[in-house]
Amino acid sequence: MCGRYIILSCRKVFATTEFLAQLEKQKIPYLEVKRFNASPTQKLPIVVNRENTLQTMEATWWMIPPWSKDGKPDLKFASFNARAEGVAESKLFSRYFKSRRCLVPADGFYEWKKISDKEKQPMCIRMKDEKPFFFSGVYSIWKNKETEEEIPSFSIITTTPNKLMSEIHNRMPVILPEKHFEQWLDPNYNDTDALKKLLVPCPAKNMKAYPVSKYVSNSRNEGEECMKPIEEK
């Protein structure tokens, strides 16, 4: 599962990758967002290749199904995550997995480690070098038939945990290596078997995890306190 994450600077994230540096070189506008506690239903930046053009867009983090009548997420169905094991066959996600894949910029994410039957400790997970990275995602664009208004939304793909994450939770988001960005974003590449092979855990040796304040557990809370390390009990 991935229900919260951190995005400190889109400009910094894109600058770390040669492929996405094209956004800067081509002066493609992108959404500059800073979130210490990015949460489902918020509008957040994603990177897509739409109409053979690399671009960023603001999208709701909770996939809006094509059968929606009002362009709003169905909160009864937690579609802010898509499981890697079934994304190619899912009634909701399969159509987007074939041609509408996206990258979600991030600097870290949170997960809650079970301490006891009554207590969970929020953990912040980042790269050891604290460099930003990208989650693998899928996106949709719901269109109002009367007004032609387009409402983008997305879901982050999750997979089985690596050794580090297995001590915290039984799922983790897919963090895609830069060498696969172009293939992942290509809407004309639809070999789903090959794409599914990319949905693997990031090596544990590249990551670190540390406890943070329960302040982050409230999705309305923001600020550096969310990701500030505390002493583990």
Image (tube, rainbow, N blue to C red):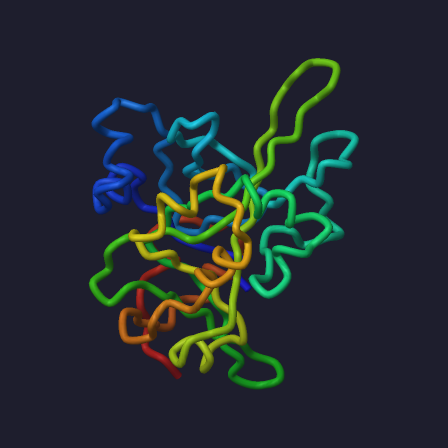
| Nearest to the observer: residue 115 or residue 26 | 26
- The count of marks equals 0
Residue 50: give x, y in percent of width and height: 47, 29
| Nearest to the observer: residue 28 or residue 10 | 28
Q: Is residue 125 above or below residue 7?
A: below
The answer to whether residue 61 is seen in the rendering is no
Q: Is residue 63 left or right of residue 227?
A: right
Residue 144: give x, y in percent of width and height: 70, 22
Q: Is residue 195 above or below residue 99?
A: below
| Quarter occupied by the C terminus | bottom left
The answer to whether residue 51 is seen in the rendering is yes
The residue under the point 28% across, 30% down is: 23
The residue under the point 43% across, 47% down is: 184
Residue 105: give x, y in percent of width and height: 37, 46
The residue under the point 47% across, 74% down is: 161
| Quarter occupied by the N terminus | bottom right
Q: Is residue 160 left or right of residue 212?
A: right
Q: Is residue 5 left or right of residue 17?
A: right
Dividing the picture into quadrants, the one containing residue 165 is bottom left
The residue under the point 71% across, 40% down is: 65
